[in-house]
Image (cartoon, rainbow, N blue to C red):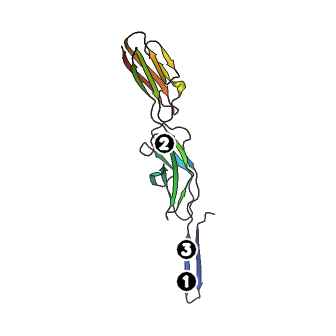
């Protein structure tokens, strides 16, 4: 079934007999990896995989992210990747099964998308009692429908990540910005501004 075998044979007569054997070890069999399909925002990301069958020698596994090995010598069928192994962004995940002879089988690559960072906002005062706000998310992208800017003077702007507001009078205002990205990270940003 798996291409692994032990072949033995004997030769010679009763006065002189010789037995020879050879081990034929095929690389580990193909296997599947189970990785998150949606954006991940947890601090640690779990992945698992099927066993890569090998009849003769034990198999260990290596996790590779974007062609760089991040964990090696794994004996189980699951592991957890933290920030050091998997940072924010879209990544290519590969699992490599290695037998004791160093023969390798690589599973089909999976795409893993991670975003642990909340949306951010930048405020900028302009002439004429105006204030501009820009809300952005660098990784998974902003959900425009989630954006809400309360200007602190009983006015509000919704669904616009870039907005400029003109105040009727000078003074101090508390601006509140709410937003969510496509990974589900929520941000509530409160800033006090002085308008002249």
How many numbered marks are there? 3
Please identify the residue farthest to the bottom as the structure is shown.
Answer: 15
Residue 77 visible in the picture? no
Q: Compared with residue 31, is residue 27 higher up or lower down, i.e. above or below?
A: below
Q: Earlier in the sequence, mark 2 or mark 1?
A: 1
Taking the image as shown, residue 174 lies to the left or right of residue 39, namely: left
Which tag is nearer the camera, tag 2 or tag 1? 2
Front-lying residue, 188 or 4:
188
Q: Compared with residue 190, is residue 35 higher up or lower down, i.e. above or below?
A: below
Residue 168 screen position, x and y as percent: 43, 10
What residue does disc 2 label?
45
Query: Which corner quadrant of the image does residue 111 belong to?
Result: top right
Residue at the (51%, 48%) spot, across then down: 93
Circle 1 crowding by C-alpha within 10 Å: few under 14, some 14–19, many from 20: few
Residue at the (42%, 16%) spot, across then down: 130
Taking the image as shown, residue 191 lies to the left or right of residue 95, namely: left
Circle 2 crowding by C-alpha within 10 Å: few under 14, some 14–19, many from 20: some
Residue 143 visible in the picture? yes
Query: Which corner quadrant of the image does residue 8 belong to?
Result: bottom right
Q: Earlier in the sequence, mark 3 or mark 2?
A: 3
Q: Marks 1/3: CA distance?
A: 14 Å
Name the image quarter holding the N terminus: bottom right
Residue 13 screen position, x and y as percent: 59, 88
Q: Secondary structure at mark 3?
A: strand
What residue does disc 3 label?
22
Q: Compared with residue 181, is residue 152 higher up or lower down, i.e. above or below?
A: above
Q: Which mark is residue 18?
A: 1
């Amino acid at each position: 079934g798996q291409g692994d075998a032990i072949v033995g044979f004997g030769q010679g007569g009763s006065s002189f007999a010789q037995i020879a054997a050879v081990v034929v070890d095929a690389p580990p069999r193909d296997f599947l990896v189970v990785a998150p399909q949606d954006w991940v925002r947890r601090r640690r990301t779990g992945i698992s995989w099927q066993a890569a069958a090998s009849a003769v020698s034990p198999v260990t596994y290596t996790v590779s992210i974007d062609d760089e090995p991040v964990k090696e010598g794994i004996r189980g069928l699951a592991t957890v990747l933290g920030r050091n192994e998997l940072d924010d962004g879209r990544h290519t995940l590969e699992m490599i099964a290695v037998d004791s002879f160093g023969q390798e089988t690589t599973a089909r690559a999976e795409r893993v998308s991670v975003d642990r960072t909340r949306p951010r906002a930048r405020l900028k005062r302009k002439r004429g009692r105006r204030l501009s706000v820009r809300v952005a998310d660098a990784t998974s992208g902003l959900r425009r429908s989630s954006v809400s800017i309360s200007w602190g003077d009983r006015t509000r702007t919704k669904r616009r990540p870039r907005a400029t507001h003109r105040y009727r009078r000078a003074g101090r205002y508390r601006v509140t910005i709410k937003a969510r990205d496509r990974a589900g990270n929520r941000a509530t940003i409160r800033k006090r501004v002085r308008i002249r």
